[in-house]
Image (spheres, rainbow, N blue to C red):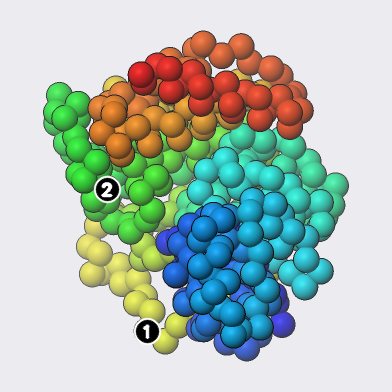
């Protein structure tokens, strides 16, 4: 049996992962589940999946969770440190990190230190500390298995050749909610409009990132570390149908693409069952190319989507700059969701903070966290 700890089980990725485990049956167990605040959802999950442990970061939520599960054998932990305690548990074989934002980094490093393989749905840990995370993973013999549909596609496509034969990777992007929106009207976009993604159903933060294409900027940095690439070996194309999830081009000109209908259960199941590939749920809809009819691609407009330029800059310069980009973006997105910042202001704030930053090369974890705090303060000041 493979025992899986799901960090962020009450979010979109976590819920999909539990659907996959429900389908996979007795050989896969959700042995630990965590949430930040959604205690009622976590309680329902615990009652169905019977994990050995659950953790709730929010203190009041934890009190209510303990009361709800008082007749249950599950152990209830509380506080941020409880997440790190769960990933260190000897019973855990695989950690699925689906926590949103920079908060996932401490648990990611703790899991690696305890030699736990990681299924990574969280971009930010690699964006902030890619060199540290990947080097620690190599030292401890830990597999980093991407869950993002794009990086999972690259991971799968790379199996067609040797890493030394690679020429470049091509990340696809849907273009988000405003792919065809008049550029001169982007200033007036509301949070409600930005949260209406044309293809995927995701959490609020990642949906806004998709609308600005900051999600692709983060993925550029993530890919740089996951696959040991240079920034110039990464390309981004807009792909309207979200059927090709990303591609790999080899030195001989061969391009290998991973395709499928837009359903996060596919990359999640691949990550949970890796290195095996097991049958999908019997209700799964399979790709019918004749029904799709056509696949279309566009070069991204860097004037409309300046976040991509910032992503390539951060991937190329490295050091503490990616952590600054990520932190400023988290603050700016939250301000937009609270109607304190215009949609076009999100990337403007991020770029302003990045330009102000004095980068530190080959940073320690302390350097990264210091830069993260500095960027959040700078972004907050700029917004105010």
- On residue 195, which mark appears? 2
For residue 303, the mark is none
Dot 2: within a 10 Å radius of its alpha carbon, few (fewer than 14), some, or many (20 or more) residues? many
For residue 239, side relative to residue 163 (left or right)? left
What x and y, as percent, mark residue 88? 78, 60
6 and 186: which is toward the camera: 6
Disc with the residue nearer the chain's start (2 vs 1): 2
Query: Mark 2 or mark 1: which is in front?
Result: 2
Q: Where, quadrant-wise, is the N terminus in this rendering?
A: bottom right
SS of the residue at dot 2?
A: loop
Position in image of residue 203 (x %, y %): 38, 53
At x 43%, y 54%, the residue is 245
Pointer 1 residue: 283
Query: Does the residue at mark 2 contact the one at mark 1 (Cβ under 8 Å)?
Result: no
Q: Disc 1 on helix, strand or loop?
A: loop
Residue 293 rendering spot, x and y as whole percentages: 22, 62
Give residue 334's quadrant in the image.
top left
Q: Nearer the viewer, residue 227 or 67?
A: 67
Measuring from the top left, give residue 257's x and y in whole percent. 47, 55
273, 338: nearer the viewer: 338
- The quarter in which the C terminus is drawn is top left
């Amino acid at each position: 049996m493979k025992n899986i700890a799901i960090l962020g089980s009450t979010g979109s990725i976590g819920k999909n992962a539990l659907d996959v485990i429900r389908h996979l049956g007795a050989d896969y167990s959700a042995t630990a589940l965590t949430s930040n605040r959604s205690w009622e959802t976590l309680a329902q999950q615990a009652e169905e999946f019977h994990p050995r442990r659950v953790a709730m970061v929010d203190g009041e939520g934890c009190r209510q969770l303990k009361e709800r599960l008082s007749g249950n054998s599950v152990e209830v932990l509380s506080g941020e440190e409880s997440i790190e305690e769960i990933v260190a548990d000897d019973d855990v074989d695989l950690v699925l990190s689906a926590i949103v934002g920079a908060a996932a980094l401490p648990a990611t490093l703790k899991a690696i230190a305890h030699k736990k393989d990681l299924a990574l749905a969280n971009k930010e840990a690699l964006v902030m500390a890619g060199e540290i995370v990947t080097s620690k993973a190599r030292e401890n013999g830990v597999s980093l298995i991407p869950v993002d549909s794009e990086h999972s596609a690259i991971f799968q496509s790379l199996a067609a050749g040797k890493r030394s034969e690679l020429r470049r990777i091509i990340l696809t992007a849907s273009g988000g909610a405003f792919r065809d929106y008049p550029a001169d009207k982007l200033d007036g976009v509301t949070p409600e409009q930005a949260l209406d993604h044309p293809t995927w159903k995701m959490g609020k933060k990642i949906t806004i990132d998709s609308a600005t294409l900051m999600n692709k900027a983060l993925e550029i940095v993530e890919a740089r570390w996951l696959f040991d690439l240079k920034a110039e070996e990464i390309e981004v194309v807009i792909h309207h149908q979200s059927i090709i999830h990303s591609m790999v081009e080899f030195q001989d000109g061969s391009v290998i693409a991973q395709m499928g209908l837009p359903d996060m259960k596919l990359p999640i199941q691949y990550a949970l069952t890796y290195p095996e590939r097991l049958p999908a749920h019997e209700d799964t809809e399979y790709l019918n190319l004749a029904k799709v009819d056509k696949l279309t691609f566009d070069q991204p407009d860097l004037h409309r989507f300046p976040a991509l330029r910032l992503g390539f800059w951060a991937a190329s310069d490295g050091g503490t700059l990616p952590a600054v980009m990520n932190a400023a973006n988290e603050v700016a997105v939250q301000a937009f969701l609270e109607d304190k910042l215009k949609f076009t202001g999100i990337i403007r704030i991020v770029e302003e903070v990045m330009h102000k930053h004095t980068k530190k090369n080959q940073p320690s974890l302390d350097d990264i966290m210091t830069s993260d705090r500095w960027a959040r303060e700078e972004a907050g000041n700029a917004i105010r």
